[in-house]
Amino acid sequence: MLLLAVALYAGCTGQKADDVYVVGWEHYGDNRTGRVAKLWKNSKIASLTRKNTHDAVALSVYLSDNDIYIAGYDIVSFNMFARLWKNGVAQKLNITSNFSEASSVYVSDNDVYVAGRDGNVATVWKNGMPERLTDGTYSASAQSVFVSGNDVYVVGRERNAQGNNVATLWKNGTVQKLTDGIFEAKAFSVFVMDDNVYVAGYEYNAQGRTVAKLWENGKAQILHTDELNNSSALSVYVSGNDVYVSGQKRYVATLWKNGTAESLSYGTNESEAWSVFVSGNDVYVAGCERNDQGIYIAKLWKNGEAINLTDGKNGDAKAFSVFVK
């Protein structure tokens, strides 16, 4: 593994502006087939893995004190392995299969929680040790973890007997189905505020399109009502009385505030908004947008203003998670 540069931590003391951490991946080389897990701090890039060794993807970032935790996965010899990095160094996750993924990381009281999948089993690791959320009868995965007090909330999806994914919430391992399983559905993000549980995801409609949804305490709100165009809710963040959801509407990166949509991209190229984080009066969104050459550019939006994290010279890149300190 390539350790993060010492300079990454320079200037972390004293009064200063927000430090903005974004993780994702970027292609490398002329063949544009390999992926390197990436961390951007204030738009400056560091690599978590070496190019020309294996593919790697970073999906989630969390800051605790001065430690940077990143969840993702490596692909080695056609096998996929869940990974957790702490300050750039890979940590031990107890996994049992050759197909696993770490989708989300959360730190609470020095305990590190990672949500993902181990084989077909939705799993949450606490300090590297797994808790199986499903029994493996049907394929399942966990996409997001949030800790509030003594309660651990995890969301994701599990297939039913009819073969449809059901958007699912687990609280301390106890399951709650958010959808009835008639149509395909997935939950991507969970946030808890004042004992209210917010979940972002999507569900297919009768026309075969995905519909962006926000569940509050299990009750669904449809964020996009155009039945003939796809939409998806990928991340939720609550600040005060405001609920922010990022995702995609008609293939355009979108931010909803209290149900009202704002497009983050105004061109004709496809874009995605994978993660939202609120710090004071500033709203940060991480995602990507295709350029005119058809290459995905990793992006960060601050209060709607776009910042390019990559230039497309190495090929596609995507940003999946943002955390502000």
Image: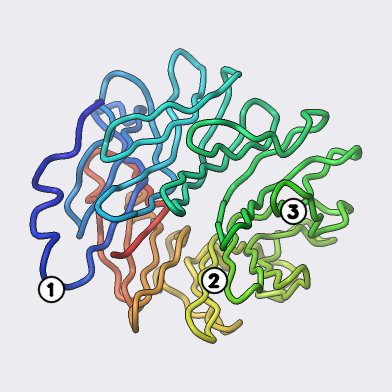
Q: For this view, does 164 lie left or right of residue 308?
A: right
Disc on the earlier residue, 1 or 2: 1
Q: Which residue is mark 1?
A: 15
Q: For this view, does 296 lie left or right of residue 159?
A: left
- The secondary element bearing badge 1 is classed as loop
Q: Which residue is mark 2?
A: 245
Can you tell which of label 3 and label 1 is closer to the viewer?
Answer: 1
Mark 1 vs mark 2, CA separation in Å: 30 Å
Q: Nearer the viewer, residue 230 or 131?
A: 131
x, y (%) of residue 263?
Answer: 47, 76
Which of the labelled discs sits on residue 215, or is there none?
none
Picture residue at 34% right of the left edge, 84% below the top: 281
x, y (%) of residue 186?
Answer: 70, 52
Q: Is residue 213 above or below residue 32?
A: below
x, y (%) of residue 97?
Answer: 60, 19
- The secondary element bearing badge 2 is classed as strand
Type of amino acid under label 3: Ala
**Quadrant of the rendering where the C terminus is positioned:** bottom left
Q: Nearer the viewer, residue 240 or 311?
A: 240
Disc on the earlier residue, 3 or 1: 1
Type of amino acid under label 1: Gln
Disc on the earlier residue, 3 or 2: 3
x, y (%) of residue 150?
Answer: 60, 57
Type of amino acid under label 2: Val
Q: How many marks?
A: 3
Picture residue at 74% right of the left edge, 52% below the top: 168
Picture residue at 20% right of the left edge, 32% below the top: 3
